[in-house]
Amino acid sequence: MAKFYRFDEAFLSRIREDVDLAELVSREIKLKRAGRNFVALCPFHKENSPSFRVKPETNTYKCYGCPASGDVISWMMQRHHLKFPEAVVRLAEENRIELPPPESDSPDDQERRRRLAKLYNVLKDAARIYHSGLERNVAARAYLVGERGLSDATIAEFGLGAVTSGIIRLLARSGDDLLIAAGLAVQGERGLYDRFRDRIIFPIENESGSIVGFAGRTMLPSNGKTPKYLNTAETEIFHKGKELYGLSKAKMAIRKARLAVVVEGYLDVLRAHQEGDKRVVAPMGTAITEHQVKRLLVQTDHLVFAFDGDRAGRRAALAAAAVLLGELKDGQTAQFLFLPEGEDPDTFIRDQGIAAWEEALKGARTLSAFLSDYVTHRLDRTIPERQVVAANKAKAVLAKVSKALIYRHALRLLFEDLIGVPLS
């Protein structure tokens, strides 16, 4: 029976980071140092002057004379005409990176892959229809372009769309079961109906860039019954607690900067990317989860969370801190940026500019400082009862630290000094 490999994002990230692209490329073409980069005549098209660049900082290549670009996996695929799994396996074997255990390609596995391929294809078709609908939707364009100030380039890059009555009639050939399985349709008492109607559409991509679902912002007047934002229901390929909006477009910038910025909204991500900060991602309209934190920590060891400065923002930060304490390892760090009350990253960047945003990020509070504020809130060291309350909060915080043992020890010493009583 044939064998195949299932590669998770952590393994693929290791391949992309551990294999030296410049060394790999230099086996076949002559590279010449040019500042921080290497240049060469492009191997993918004929040219007289070098337009092919290898960038060691990001471990990527790009040709400015043809569409060729990518990382070590892309190089193997384009240069040696390999399929994605074949390219990954060859890179792993040549660089002595242990492959995951192979899986049997059983009839059930084959059927599952065919089913998933159909889901990805119908979502891709839906995204194309939603995007084309935006051109005809005056209200949606007025909101995105006029009110929110998004450029046509940003709208195109993120594939934003719009829908009024629905699109499932245009996808009828796919079949009701597939439309329901993809999260595009819902079976009601009166038959099949669209999940997304009268909404601006934000396609959700997985880390590899494939569309797995959608988020929709209502264009109807608020009536207290219609949710402002609506996500695709949980499906076989979409789990809102695992995906991060914008990660497929942000991961290279995150790796280069060694920093990921987490915001709360889709429009916050769009604004930051449009103005030049490509490191920004967002959860699916909910609190950050351990799966999402793990996904980011594959890309970088430094996270900054940006929250509103109001009470809700502080509660969201506390929830994020609880998740971080269980996932961070020694050497990994997190910070919190609290914006002025009434501001979010979208309005802050629009009003004050990207330079002010960068400066604000530099001044973000460390996780330890934020936790110290939480533990010592209303502490009076002259009142033992208040010390007990603070000590119990400190113990609860320390109990959540499971992987960063040195950090937990340092945090305990900090809390003891602030509270004035031992915690052991």
Image (tube, rainbow, N blue to C red):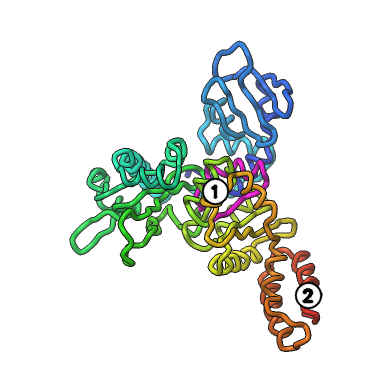
Tell me residue 262's x, y (percent). 58, 54
User: Residue 340 vs residue 231: left or right?
Assistant: right
Q: Which badge, 2 or 1, is on the more N-terminal residue?
A: 1
Q: Quadrant of residue 323?
A: bottom right
Element marked by disc 1: helix
Q: Is residue 388 visible?
A: yes
Tell me residue 86's x, y (percent). 54, 35
Write the residue at 63% across / 53% down.
297
Q: Quadrant of residue 367?
A: bottom right
Amino acid residing under circle 1: Asp
407 versus 197 height, above or below = below
Q: Which residue is mark 2?
A: 418
User: Residue 31 vs residue 308: left or right?
Assistant: right
Element marked by disc 2: helix
Residue furthest toward the front?
A: 351
Q: Quadrant of residue 231?
A: bottom left
98 versus 391 height, above or below = above
Please tell me which residue lies in front, 115 or 211: 211
Would residue 262 be counted in the magenta stretch? yes
Tell me residue 114's x, y (percent). 38, 45
Would residue 72 be counted in the magenta stretch? no
Q: Is residue 110 visible?
A: no
Q: Which residue is mark 1?
A: 351
192 versus 1 height, above or below = below
Region in magenta: 244-263
